[in-house]
Amino acid sequence: MTKTKLTEILQKRSIQYTEVGKWGKYLRGVWEREFAEAISSDERGKIYMDHFLWHIFSYEKVEAYEKDHARQAFDKEAKDSVYVFYQHLDLAYLIENAKDTIAEDFKDEQDIYIVNTEFQWTYVNTHESACGPYFYHKTSTTALLKNDL
């Protein structure tokens, strides 16, 4: 298993995870299909999605929680099984009992994506302090959720 800062944090917090080989590329493809399906190929090029998938949020093509609202929404979300993967690495993890994971666990990770295994919601921590983190849930409207935070 690959030892990273994240795996050290998960181990210290007794959160069980499994390294899922080189699934990063596959998971990025599914993430793009599931969360950016309404964005045209031309528009994807204009927002440099080939560099960072999270540009759908920073370029406001998809409305998402940002900063503290994103952290709070992620912390409140019911989390069963989640995938954790990176923008530029093929390294990925599966956390099958993720209920105890919180945004703080991922704060030092750059360009990391956390998504439930059904791809209904995602939490993204970027490498840019001015961008993100972001939390997006397919079935909830951001306006309604912000009232709950």
Image (spheres, rainbow, N blue to C red):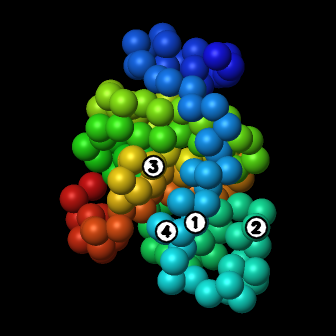
Give coordinates of residue 10: x percent, y percent: 49, 20
The alpha-carbon separation of the residues under discs 3 and 2 comes to: 19 Å
What residue is drawn where x is 42% and y is 62%? 136
Q: Are marks 2 and 1 in contact (CB under 8 Å)?
A: no
What residue is drawn where x is 53% and y is 19%? 9
Q: Nearer the viewer, residue 58 or 8?
A: 8
Location of residue 1 with respect to 88 vertically, above or below: above
Give coordinates of residue 41: x percent, y percent: 68, 84
The alpha-carbon separation of the residues under discs 2 and 1 comes to: 10 Å
Q: Are marks 3 and 2 in contact (CB under 8 Å)?
A: no
Q: Which residue is mark 3?
A: 115
- 126 left or right of 94 in image: right
Q: Earlier in the sequence, mark 2 or mark 4?
A: 4
Q: Quadrant of residue 36?
A: bottom right
Q: Amino acid at mark 4?
A: Phe
Q: Which residue is mark 4?
A: 35
Element at badge 4?
A: helix
Give coordinates of residue 121: x percent, y percent: 39, 57
Q: Earlier in the sequence, mark 3 or mark 4?
A: 4
The alpha-carbon separation of the residues under discs 2 and 4 comes to: 14 Å
Q: Which residue is mark 2?
A: 50
Q: Amino acid at mark 2?
A: Asp
Tell me if mark 3 has few (under 14), some (14-19) or many (20+) residues whose alpha carbon lies within 10 angstroms of its own: many
Q: Are marks 4 and 1 in contact (CB under 8 Å)?
A: yes
Q: Amino acid at mark 1?
A: Glu
Quadrant, the C terminus: bottom left
